[in-house]
Image: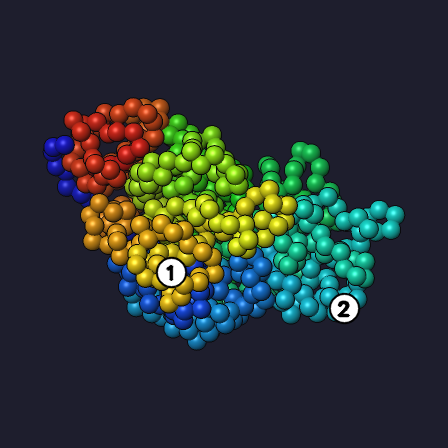
Amino acid sequence: MTGHTDLRPTDPGPATTWWRHAVVYQIYVRSFADGNGDGIGDLAGMTSRLPYLRDLGVDALWINPWYPSPLLDGGYDVADYRDVDPRIGTLAQAEAFIAAAHEHGIRVLADLVPNHTSWDHDWFRAALAAAPGSPERNRYHFADGSGPDGSLPPNNWTSFFGGPAWTRLDDGQWYLHLFDTSQPDLNWELDEVRAEFEDVLRFWFDRGIDGFRVDVAHALRKAPGLPDVEPPFRNSDPGPGNHPYLDRDEVHEVIRGWRRVADAYDDRMLVAEASVHPERLPDYLRSDEYHQAFNFEFLEVGWRGWRQRDTIPRAVERATAVGSTPTWTLSNHDQVRHATRFALPSEVDAKRWLLGGDRRWLDEGLGVRRARAAALLQLALPGSVYLYQGEELALPEATELPVEVLQDPEWERSDHTTKGRDGCRVPVPWVATAPSFGFGDTDDPWLPQPADYGRYAVDVQAGDPTSTLELHRRALALRRAHLTGDEEVDFLDLGRAVVAFRRGSGVVCVINMGTRPVVLPPGRLLLASGDGPTDGLLSPDDAVWLLAD
Ligand code: BGC
């Protein structure tokens, strides 16, 4: 690789705000760092790790729900939206954490869970104590059953976790829960519900929160009369839009209300978890709605170069056409970690494989190699990257969790047909030789760590130039300097299974998802996920950043 082109420096320009090209690091609180040795991650632990996050070079954090909760769905069952769970810390500690993060130059996004509350929320308790037809019950979706004696659910909706989306009470009425029984859905037709959540936003904005990731942002509004799901629709699949309970046009009014609240503050942002048809996603990104939305197509397509060549440019186009920026995510707390997904043949459904799949299909080395290459891909694309804790270590899924320790409601509600999401939520290894690999002063974290997790520990990787952690540190520093100035991107055709593009600064990214070496364009090598090119050829499962001639 010869030749030299000067990099064009980043020029954010007046209209650019921080979130447009941010690297956002997702913290699954219970599993990140345990400050008091009770086996559960907490605010004290998170605060102590802020220097690590600053040195990694992230711009912001997204904190999974930290509110008081019976933890029947990992905190997505919120009992009080204006407080912190005592196992995680106190409200004062949360405020101090936000301030400390800001001092480290890091912004903080909280998680808003508006579709449902916990059954321990005051509103739901009041609804249970009140009579059918009461205003207290009207805050949720209570209905009489169907069938001659009302003993069948009111309609045929199913829970995302399996089984019917309805639970019956002793008084004969049923209530709706698109997720676990412990997560009753709110009635978003009510002004009272809207006012309450707008107030919750203000509560946290006033405490310094820089924005929110909004949970199941596409499910809030339900069709009047709660009709059955009928073809062409299917349960749990939004289809082309206006499904009986997903991606309904009315949801946009709710979002506009939140945006007005956010806009009354400086520089706050809202990012949607809206698993809708990709053609419908731009509607969520209109200038008076969300700033950004997760792009799950990128995650789902995964290691299939010929499809990424198509889906990546379309995601860029869709987001930029409405003035937003695209987002890139490979893992989160709901997905099998991608170091493991990429270690399996691409036709294997990793989630199913977890439950009794053939272990011989797993090639851990290949998974790590591809995860490193994919890191360079997502970090070179225009827009924001949402990294999941441990991803910077190429941490694999904990694939051998005994079923007795599983906590995810998916395990029970699916009648044990899926193991659920606990395997990606196992506590992070920080120190190879310490109890719980340095997660906390405990031998007994809330989920057991695999015996070999020490291999991935931060202290083993820090300072080793060949480690995945150091690869991320270098990539984030280069990205910050040269890849966040604009959204300019020209896609290059280097072969059917190769994703390649040139950014406005002159940086070229090439990732080889095929099976044969690929000829690289001329340029000086900036960063390589593997050993780097040989004789101008990039090996399969590798990626590079070049400075174009
Ligand atoms: C969250 C899940 C959660 C569900 C219900 C999701 O999309 O990411 O972890 O179980 O919403 O709140």
Say which amino acid is labelled 2.
Ala
- Describe residue 460's horizontal placement relative to residue 422 as left or right: left
Q: Name the residue under label 2.
A: 130
Instruction: Tally the numbered discs.
Output: 2
Residue at 38%, 51% in the rendered image? 451
Say which amino acid is labelled 1.
Ser
Q: Earlier along the polypeptide chain: callout 2 or callout 1?
A: 2
Q: Is any atom of residue 492 visible in this view?
A: no
37 relative to 219, above or below:
below
Residue at 84%, 46% in the rendered image? 147
Q: Quadrant for the N terminus, please.
A: top left
- Describe residue 444's horizontal placement relative to residue 482 as left or right: right
Image location of residue 280, percent across then percent down: 53, 40
On residue 436, which mark appears? 1
Image location of residue 266, percent across then percent down: 40, 64
Image location of residue 335, percent across then percent down: 47, 45
For mark 2, does the 10 Å Cα neighbourhood hold few (<14), some (14 to 19), or many (20 or more) residues?
Answer: few
Would the CB of label 1 be found within 8 Å of ligand 1? no
Residue at 70%, 40% in the rendered image? 229
- Most distant residue in the bottom direction: 92
Residue at 67%, 60% in the rendered image? 190
Q: Quadrant for the C terminus, please.
A: top left
Q: Is any atom of residue 116 visible in this view?
A: yes
Q: Are marks 2 and 1 in contact (CB under 8 Å)?
A: no
Q: Is label 1 in a helix, a strand or a loop?
A: helix
Q: Nearer the viewer, residue 548 or 64?
A: 64
